[in-house]
Amino acid sequence: MMKIHKIRFLEPGNLPYRRSIRNLYVYDRYIRTPSIGLLTLATIVKRQVGDTLMYSESISKIRWEDVLDADIVFIGIFTFNANRGYELAQYIRRHSKAVVVLGGLHASMNYPEACRCSDYVLLGEGDESILKLIDAVEKGSAVDFPGVACWKDGKALTTGACPPPKDINVIPDRDLLYRYRKMAGRNTVWPQVHASRGCPHHCDYCALVRHFGRTVRTRSPENVVADIRYSIAFHDQGHHRLTKVLWITDDNFFADRAWALSVLQAIIQSGIQYHFTIQARYEVGFDDEMLELLKRAGFMELAMGIEFLEDEAFQNYHKQSTCGEIIRSIENIQKHGLRVRGLFIVGADNHTKGVGNRLADFVIEHHICGVLIQSMYFVPGTPVYETHKNKLIHTDWSRYNGNVVHYPENISPYGLQREMILASRKIYSFKRLLKAVFCRRGLERVLFFGEYFWQKSIRADLRKELPFLKKVSEESGLYPAQ
Ligand code: B12
Ligand code: SF4
């Protein structure tokens, strides 16, 4: 029997937080909004173990003197911060007696890798399994419930999938994150609330649906509204933020229509006056009742997973949509007074030279207010990983943050990276900045101004990868016309 007194949670950052003037406007190269998932787990654990605290490298440095004497350290990783997570895990194992546990999307999808530098990996959602693990460590009993993986006798062993938690009505206690309250007033650290999990679709490139499953699970409208209220107060009290926007981070908030309507009604009835942004599939653009409620509740934009502009790509990757439907949807959303942000993927097998230009023209023509352009991502466990694993340039996960990481069929990696830069430069041109400053009003102007500099920093990062991509493109011998 070993009494557990102290537990620490760590969120690795690609580059640990550093003060910079640019951070006033852009989230720079750093993840600045900390992981709500890990905070949720810390909140659950705190009920059982009083001395529980979290560090996020997007918010502060890790105070090692406080971490190394913990009994258990939990580390959460996505793909882009996995390498740093492994580094932290190995450091703790070398310098402390703490049990080191890895979890999160990347650790779950790629557990044979994650097992090698931790004592245990917890698969899937950790809301219930984390307490089982603490209990087992405390009792000194075998950690053999469903959803565990570990490295034993030279191989990765697993007890299989973890059943999803029954209740996800947890309001993350933001004060459990070291220095979060102090940093919360920054314009680049947005309040976030995650209200549902799971998505009924099965797009080939999506790791989320493999991690959270195809059954949609929701928090109660009251619980969501209480979280929104608390999150706004946490970020605004004592601060003068320019951008008062809360991000509902669900992957498919509208999948359960009746529930989505009831959450919007609850926000309206609560009297909360704020701006909201949310991710959405194109179908919501045909739902006039939903759009009306979104507008009344304070939503200013929908970030639409447009992904591609060609029906061929939608079919190839099993994304159920067509370009024509997307355009009709955008137009109807805009008719309701809501803006549309576009989330795009480049590097599909059919993509050729000019893809960036076409994307930029589409964005400008359809008055899309902002973009995130992401090169195709390949996470072990997704169908695209299986079909493309021999076409990956490398598996240096720290570079899986927007860069081209594979050999596309019809354009070289170097050419594709340049297309992304070109698209961003055309959409965020100086001319369009001046137009935004002189012709747009209020929050719209502030947001474009912020994004102009954010995209400048994204392009600078993309450019850094160009010499490497030029070299691998040439060496591959696959793109003679390059
Ligand atoms: C908010 C968000 C952001 C925020 C903050 C991210 C953060 N710190 O969490 C910001 C804006 C910074 C961001 C940036 C990016 N993001 Co982002 N983001 C999200 C989003 C929409 C929501 C995250 C969230 O709150 N999830 C909900 C919670 C409940 O889930 P969770 O965090 O996974 O936690 C649960 C479990 O995983 C598990 N768990 C998690 N950690 C641990 C740890 C342990 C020990 C255990 C036991 C369990 C466990 O238990 C938790 C509770 O159930 C996700 C999509 C998603 N649904 O996750 C994309 C997502 C994480 N982003 C993604 C990407 C690609 C990016 C960017 C690279 C985009 C880009 N091109 O710039 C950048 C990376 C920035 C960088 N510097 O490198 C991808 C990552 C794919 C991958 N394989 O890793 C995702 C999954 C979106 C997608 N469509 O695929 N992102
Ligand atoms: S609709 Fe979005 S969340 Fe759902 S499977 Fe497709 S990409 Fe993933």
Image (cartoon, rainbow, N blue to C red):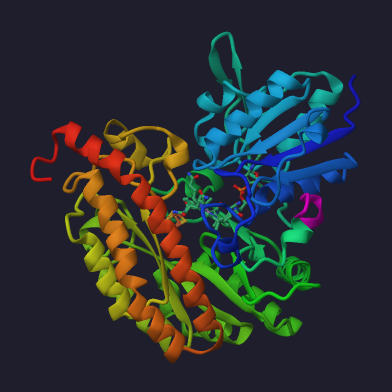
Lateral position of residue 165 relative to residue 137, left or right: left
Lateral position of residue 211 relative to residue 396, left or right: right
The quadrant where ligand 2 appears is bottom left
Tell me where residue 47 appears, x and y as whole percent: 87, 46
Lateral position of residue 326 relative to residue 446, left or right: left
Query: Is any atom of residue 85 visible in this view?
Result: yes
Tell me where residue 386 appears, x and y as whole percent: 33, 35
Residue 352, compared with residue 263, is above or below; it is above
Q: Quadrant of residue 197?
A: bottom right
Say which residue appears at 64% left-offset and 44% top-offset. Answer: 164
Where, quadrant-wise, is the C terminus in this rendering? top left
Where, quadrant-wise, is the N terminus in this rendering? top right
Q: Quadrant of residue 173?
A: bottom right
Tell me where residue 294 appears, x and y as whole percent: 56, 81
Lateral position of residue 91 relative to residue 44, left or right: left
Query: Is any atom of residue 202 visible in this view?
Result: no
Say which residue appears at 75% left-offset and 56% top-offset. Answer: 180
Secondary structure mostly taken by the magenta-highlighted segment of the chain: loop
178 in magenta: yes
Say which residue appears at 50% left-offset and 83% top-offset. Answer: 445
Q: Nearer the viewer, residue 21 or 206?
A: 21
* Residue bounds of the magenta highlight: 172-179
463 in magenta: no
Say which residue appears at 77% left-offset and 24% top-offset. Answer: 98
